[in-house]
Amino acid sequence: MNPQQVRDFFTRNHTRPKKQLGQNFLVNPEALNIILETGEVRDCDTVIEIGAGLGYLTDALARHAQRVIAVEVDELLYNALAAQFSVDSQVQLLNADILKLEFNSLLSENTASEDPTTFKVIANLPYSITTPILWKLLAHRRQLHSCVLMMQKEVAERIVAGPGGKDYGALTIGVAYHAESSLIATLSPENFYPSPKVDSALLKLTMRESPKVSVEDEMLFFKIVRTAFRMRRKMLKNALVRGRFASAERLAAAFEETGIAPERRAETLDITEYAALTNFLVQC
């Protein structure tokens, strides 16, 4: 698909791509090939495609996967997809908002069969709701094998960032806890029509069988991480005192026990250090 084909579709339908839905259509076949290679789609896979658009990627996926579940919220695009794939039994179309869709219903394949399907997600995410979609996917990490996601470059860089930089934050740790992330490629706006105002990046998440670190209280772990980064300019001891996780004395003991200097700031701690703090404080 090229930019002219996208323009022609919207001209015929007397409308334009909807900015509020983040409609930027991939028009570079080389980028499509990178997505397919990264997804490692096999004939035993079920691929959930979020934002199927005009079916450019959907068609390619259907030639490799056992089944494609293509989700599209825009009714006009959904109707175009329905016409295109009306006789393709491999493609299941859903006219739905991914954030409102009950994911368990999509992931209810019979795993008792001899060759159960592997669920993967491949998507060109609407940039304005990337983070909520990420958390929804991670909530189903035990059912999903991997996700190949196109997103705003800035968000992808935050996810793969290492400790010490400005990009490193609660999102980095939250994703790393549940999945291994790899930045596959960056794409300039010219790879899409209409061209977004920002660069994009292709990110792969491979779900972990167990969390990256062992914590005795996940809720407390994530609360500590979020609090620390919400006050990332403060020394860690001050941020956590304000978060009321424990008394100043108990926190001092936690820092001493874990060997973490209380004067450090949130972005200097790695995920194992946050886990160590959590596990000590659980004993309070």
Image: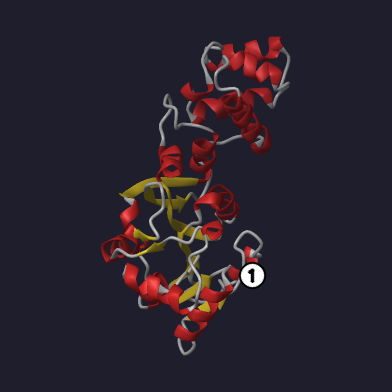
Q: Amino acid at mark 1?
A: Ser
Question: In the rendered image of this protein, does residue 82 appear above or below residue 229?
Answer: below
Which of 242 and 129 lies nearest the eye of the viewer?
Answer: 129
User: How busy is the neighbourhood of tag 1: few (under 14 within 10 Å), some, or many (20 plus)?
Assistant: few
- Coloured how? secondary structure
Q: Quadrant of residue 257?
A: top right
Q: Look at the numbered disc 1 and give the secondary structure of its residue.
A: helix
Is 202 or 175 nearer to us in this picture?
A: 202
| Position in image of residue 98 (x %, y %) | 59, 62
Q: Which residue is mark 1?
A: 105
- Residue that appears at 31% across and 70% down: 2
- The quadrant holding residue 278 is top right
Quarter occupied by the N terminus: bottom left
The spot of residue 271 in percent (x, y) is 50, 31
* x and y percentages locating residue 228 in the rendered image: 59, 25
| For residue 106, above or below residue 126 | below
Which residue does the image show at 66% across and 15% down from the upper left?
251
Q: Is residue 146 visible?
A: yes
Instruction: Tell me the quarter of the image containing the C terminus.
Output: top right
In this view, 85 is above or below 264: below
Residue 81 image offset from top left, x and y in percent: 49, 79
Residue at the outermost bottom position: 87
Q: Quadrant of residue 27?
A: bottom left
Tally of marks: 1
